[in-house]
């Protein structure tokens, strides 16, 4: 009986969160691990670098038909400041499924370059095509009858676009991006009472620094999202890196606080912690999010697996990506000195 209640609840949530799927927050919420997913301008951020990242996320652990998402990204920046990027995803939420592919073109220009300061401005634009389907063959518990549900699959297609700009000043970054620029509704939802998809506006600010006299590197990131449905959200993230005596190996992780700002001062969404390693350009990490909403407390929180590979021609095994201005030799010396103190 409890399993049937879970299935029925998922169907109800699927029907009332169609616009959430339309906004594809399961993609843009990964910005802390890959900024390219929320701002296409980030495809031109690191000249002459390749980056491949993969994400697997599952929510409501132990619940049938729970939301599950797989994302694969690739982006590369050339020395002429041109950047290209692609990502695809497969999202399943109850009886709903969406697959999509996005292609991005980005470009960067240098506004100011002195001995102490480099200021760059990056622009990016993306086009996306998607296909959605709803499995109507068995949406209700056995024996239940609904004359509206006739079985089979319903399918629809859609296109949309994203654009963004990113300003960098040395280790500081500030970006603005707009997602779902076109007010197009997927052909699966073409009834007159279906509202158009509204544009999301995204703002993010971040930096990177090393603690003086400590072998610790940090990347704080602040993020804010808003749209016309008052679906606003704010997040604070703190990534950290701990190098070792091997310049190609480091520990890393992140702590995050997430909050919705829809009403008054909003409500808590959840907190998350990530822990992982970086070795020879490969990154792997595991995130666990402890949800603070009523539904998350009732049906469980979520986990996410992060994997990636990053290769730059000038620094092949850059284990500390935030350590700008510090070479691998400097990081190795710091780690060796730490080992001697022990």
Image (cartoon, rainbow, N blue to C red):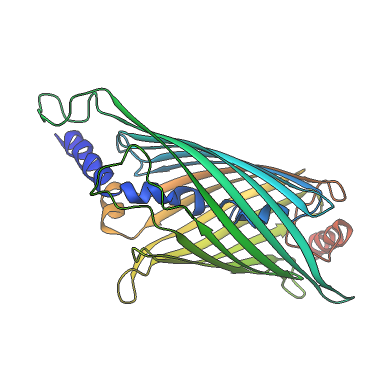
Q: Which of 325/151 is in front?
A: 151
Q: Is residue 72 among what the camera can see?
A: no
Q: Position of residue 13 (x, y in %)?
A: 25, 46
Q: Residue at x 77, y 43 (%)?
A: 280
State left or right for residue 319 relative to residue 289.
Answer: right
- Whether 216 is drawn above or below 185: the answer is below
Q: Quadrant of residue 119?
A: bottom right
Q: Residue at x 30, y 72 (%)?
A: 263
Q: Quadrant of residue 120?
A: bottom right
Residue extending farthest to the front is 192
State left or right for residue 42 relative to residue 327.
Answer: left
Q: Residue at x 10, y 24 (%)?
A: 143
Q: Position of residue 40 (x, y in %)?
A: 62, 53
| Rendered-image quadrant of the N terminus | top left
Q: Position of residue 336 (x, y in %)?
A: 84, 59
- Whether 3 is drawn above or below 246: the answer is above
Q: Is residue 225 among what the camera can see?
A: yes
Q: Position of residue 189 (x, y in %)?
A: 31, 41
- Whether 269 is drawn above or below 315: the answer is below
Q: Which of 315/105 is in front?
A: 105
Q: Which of 32/12 is in front?
A: 12
Q: Residue at x 37, y 46 (%)?
A: 185
| Rendered-image quadrant of the C terminus | bottom right
């Amino acid at each position: 009986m409890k399993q049937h209640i879970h299935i029925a609840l998922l169907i109800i949530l699927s029907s009332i969160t169609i616009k959430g799927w339309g906004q594809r927050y399961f993609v843009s919420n990964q910005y802390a691990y890959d900024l390219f997913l929320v701002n296409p301008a980030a495809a031109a951020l690191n000249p002459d670098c390749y980056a491949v990242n993969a994400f697997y996320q599952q929510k409501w652990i132990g619940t049938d038909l729970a939301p599950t998402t797989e994302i694969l990204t690739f982006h590369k920046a050339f020395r002429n400041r041109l950047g290209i990027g692609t990502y695809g995803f497969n999202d399943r939420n109850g009886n709903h499924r969406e697959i999509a592919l996005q292609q991005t073109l980005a470009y960067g220009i240098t506004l100011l370059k002195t001995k102490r300061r480099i200021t760059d401005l990056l622009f990016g634009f993306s086009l996306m095509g998607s296909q959605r389907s709803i499995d109507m063959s068995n949406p209700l518990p056995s024996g239940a009858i609904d004359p509206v549900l006739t079985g089979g699959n319903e399918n629809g297609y859609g296109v949309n676009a994203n654009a963004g700009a990113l300003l960098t000043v040395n280790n500081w970054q500030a970006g603005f991006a707009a997602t779902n620029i076109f007010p197009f509704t997927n052909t699966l939802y073409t009834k007159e009472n279906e509202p158009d998809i509204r544009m999301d506006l995204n703002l993010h600010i971040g930096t990177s620094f090393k603690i003086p006299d400590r072998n610790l590197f940090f990347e704080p990131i602040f993020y804010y999202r808003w749209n016309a449905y008052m679906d606003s959200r704010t997040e604070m993230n703190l990534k950290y890196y701990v190098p070792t005596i091997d310049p190609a190996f480091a520990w890393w992780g992140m702590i995050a606080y997430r909050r919705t700002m829809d009403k008054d001062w909003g409500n808590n969404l959840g907190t998350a912690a990530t822990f992982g390693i970086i070795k020879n350009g490969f990154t792997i990490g595991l995130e666990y999010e402890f949800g603070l909403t009523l539904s998350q407390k009732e049906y469980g929180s979520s986990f996410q697996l992060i994997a990636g590979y990053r290769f730059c021609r000038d620094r092949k095994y850059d284990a500390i990506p935030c350590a700008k201005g510090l070479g691998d030799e400097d990081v190795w010396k710091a780690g060796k000195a730490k080992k001697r103190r022990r």
